[in-house]
Amino acid sequence: MIRVRKVTIGGLFIALSVLIPQVFHLLGSAQLGKLLLPMHLPVLLGGFILGPVFGLIVGAAAPLLSTILTGMPAFERLPFMVIELAAYGFISGLAYRTLSFRKRKFGVIISLVIAMFLGRVIYALALFIAADFLHMTGIGASAVLESVITGIFGIIIQLLLIPSLIFVLERSGYYDKVTGEGKKNVT
């Protein structure tokens, strides 16, 4: 049964995925968003907290809604961001919750690294497939490498911020309250 709490928190993460990049764009420019990857934070947190299915939904919905409401990401980037962020949300939830990395020492960091690495691999595959299918030139490994290099500050922020937030949520007991773990018959 779908839990109302998870749907509500998922909606909050989607809203944050639209709002946080707007704050960065107001403070700097569109380039600041490419550097810091602010949309990734709520999506990855959505996977960690809500699990793989809701993480995938948050990851797919966030760039779609952002494009509709703000025009960012640009329409030509949208399919690739949907695929990448859906992968982040799904894989972070899968690794941390389903595969039980949560119970391991450094499980948050391991899950996060796995999600970020596989998300980029899936992004690269989608880019290569689209380039081949549409006979586009100039899209290749250099585009993926540029994306990773440009986003290195955002990746570092994610590696520092997400484990800290998950740690605080778990220590406060809020993580179990949101996820319903440790309780029976939570609706």
Image: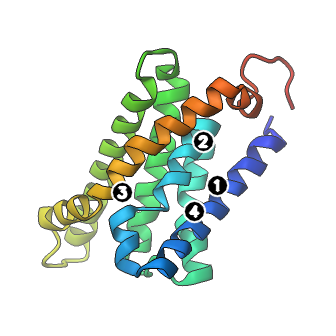
Cα distance between the residues tagged 1 and 4:
6 Å
Task: Check disc 1 and report the residue beneath it.
Answer: 13
Task: Check disc 3 and report the residue beneath it.
Answer: 154
* Disc 1 versus disc 3: nearer the observer: 3
Q: State left or right for residue 117 relative to residue 53.
A: left
* Disc 2 versus disc 3: nearer the observer: 3
Looking at the image, tell me whether mark 1 or mark 3 is earlier in sequence order.
1
Q: Label 1's element?
A: helix
Looking at the image, tell me whether mark 3 or mark 4 is earlier in sequence order.
4
Identify the image quadrant of the N terminus.
top right
Residue type highlighted by circle 4: Ser
Looking at the image, tell me whether mark 2 or mark 3 is earlier in sequence order.
2
Residue type highlighted by circle 3: Gly
Q: Please report contact status of discs 1 and 3: CB closer than 8 Å, yes or no.
A: no
Task: Check disc 4 and report the residue beneath it.
Answer: 17
Task: Check disc 2 and report the residue beneath it.
Answer: 53
Residue type highlighted by circle 2: Val
Q: Residues within 10 Å of mark 4 (few under 14, many from 20)?
A: many
How many marks the image carries: the answer is 4
Looking at the image, tell me whether mark 1 or mark 2 is earlier in sequence order.
1
Report the residue at 20% width, 60% height from top. Answer: 149
Cα distance between the residues tagged 1 and 2:
14 Å
Q: Is residue 149 above or below residue 91?
A: below
Q: Please report contact status of discs 1 and 4: CB closer than 8 Å, yes or no.
A: yes
Cα distance between the residues tagged 2 and 3:
24 Å
Q: Residues within 10 Å of mark 2 (few under 14, many from 20)?
A: some
Residue type highlighted by circle 1: Phe
Asked if residue 100 shows in the view, the reply is: yes
